[in-house]
Image (cartoon, rainbow, N blue to C red):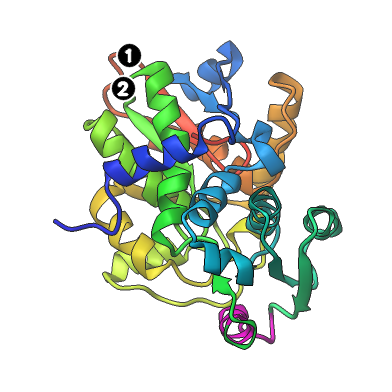
Amino acid sequence: MNLPISIADVEAAAGRLAGVAVRTPVLTSPAADSLAGAQLFFKCENLQRIGAFKFRGAFNALSRLSAEARQHGVITYSSGNHAQAIALSAKLLGMPALIVMPADAPAVKIEATRSHGAEIVLYDRYAQDREALGRSLAEARQMTLIPPYDHTDVMAGQGTAALELFDAVGPLDALFVCVGGGGLISGCAVAAAARSPGCRVIGVEPLAGDDVRQSLARGERVRIAVPQTLADGAQTQSPGELTFAVIRERVSEIATVSDEALVQTMRWLAAHLKLVVEPTGCLAAAAAHAPRLRPQRLRRDPISPVGESVSS
């Protein structure tokens, strides 16, 4: 089958990111293992540049632009982490960046994005279409639009997190991945198929925003209302066209967790692993502790949570 990205794309992205992105550590915890009834590995993407895996995909995509495209600059739309990732990557590569951000995005993320030199345009996420706004501004300013997930170079870049994980710990029985638009899970699923063929890839969405789960159940992409959830990085309304093509073929299951579970997981990670993790980044870790999702056969008992801030 012809998927939008291959393991060769992920490996090529890893080469471009070498020496630029942080090769984040993998942590283990006896307390986490006891709680989950399995051996867990946490890929700590909260220690990545800008504090999330998003830097991987952003830098990979921007590094492939032509000299002419770099001169005109890039534009994207994002609630925060992809915004910061594009802004920093553009700064490192010497090109202008324009970021469309929701007016209710966390103030710290807006200021962090601005601190990298990007121009910011705010919009109302409940009344305006960010994709239409982004396309309009890109055309008017002759800038290259790099969406937060539905882009092959972004997907391949995100997959390098899982590539590093498998290189570090070997095959896994299950890989839990936070899901918004699907950029991270699509890249990670391609990496898992190549490096650990028997691994179940389990996507995790907020309970209030299960557009990917609904899409898989229906067999086509569905669009939902803007989710009301603490996981602001997963307030997507529909999976991407490219990402959904990979998810349908490579993802075993989509699970959901409540905002209450996210808060509990944030507190647990802070208390036991001394990690500061945002709500979206807690999706995978929260699901990894759910008894119904434990792998049926655990010869080595290895599973790994993957998230926006605790990610693999």
Against 183, residue 175 (above or below) is: above
**Residue type pointed to by label 2:** Pro
**Quadrant showing the N terminus:** bottom left
Q: Quadrant of residue 24?
A: top right
Where's residue 104, x and y in %? 80, 69
What residue is disc 2 on?
Answer: 171
Please name whichever residue, 273 or 190, is drawn nearer the observer in this view of the structure: 190
What residue is disc 1 on?
Answer: 300
User: Does the magenta run of residues contain 183?
Assistant: no
The overriding secondary structure of the stretch rendered in magenta is helix
Give the mark toward the camera: 2 or 1: 2
Would residue 73 be seen by someone viewing this image from the given angle?
A: no
Precedes in sequence: disc 2 or disc 1: 2
Would residue 196 be seen by someone viewing this image from the given angle?
A: yes
What range of the chain is rendered magenta? 126-138
**Residue type pointed to by label 1:** Arg
